[in-house]
Amino acid sequence: MRCALASVLCGSIVLSPLPVLAADGSLLLVGQGGIVLQSRDGGAKFNIVRGGGRAALTDIALLSDGHWLLASDEGMHRHEPTKVAAAAAPASGAK
């Protein structure tokens, strides 16, 4: 499934090896281009909840204050997910 999803997004994107389960039950994946994908339906569809930049995100950790700690080839970055939640875009290609 990750390969099919990746090819829909940009053909060569690499996603984190395992999704992270958030407190709200959603799944999170990270990948190249600073992308974070979120699924609220068990992985059937994903939305882009953060994208941009050149960093290849390699992992994500959920902090107790609700922020994400993103690991990348550029180092660690603390991210506030609520800043981009309203701009989420579909990423699955599913109809």
Image (cartoon, rainbow, N blue to C red):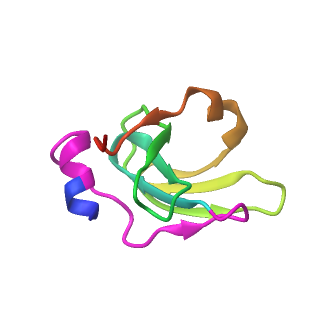
Toward the viewer: 10 or 32? 10
The quadrant of the picture occupied by the C terminus is top left
**Magenta-drawn stretch contains 17:** yes
**Left or right, 19 with reference to 63:** left
Residue shown at the point (84%, 55%) measured from the top left: 65
Toward the viewer: 94 or 54? 94
Residue 83 location, quadrant: top right
Q: Position of residue 22 (x, y in %)?
A: 65, 64
Q: Which residues are magenta?
A: 5-25
The quadrant of the picture occupied by the N terminus is bottom left
**Magenta-drawn stretch contains 8:** yes
Residue shown at the point (44%, 55%) measured from the top left: 30
Q: Position of residue 11 (x, y in %)?
A: 15, 45
- Does 81 sit above or below residue 28? above
Residue shown at the point (24%, 51%) measured from the top left: 6
Magenta stretch: helix, strand or loop mostly: loop
- Does 82 sit above or below residue 75? above
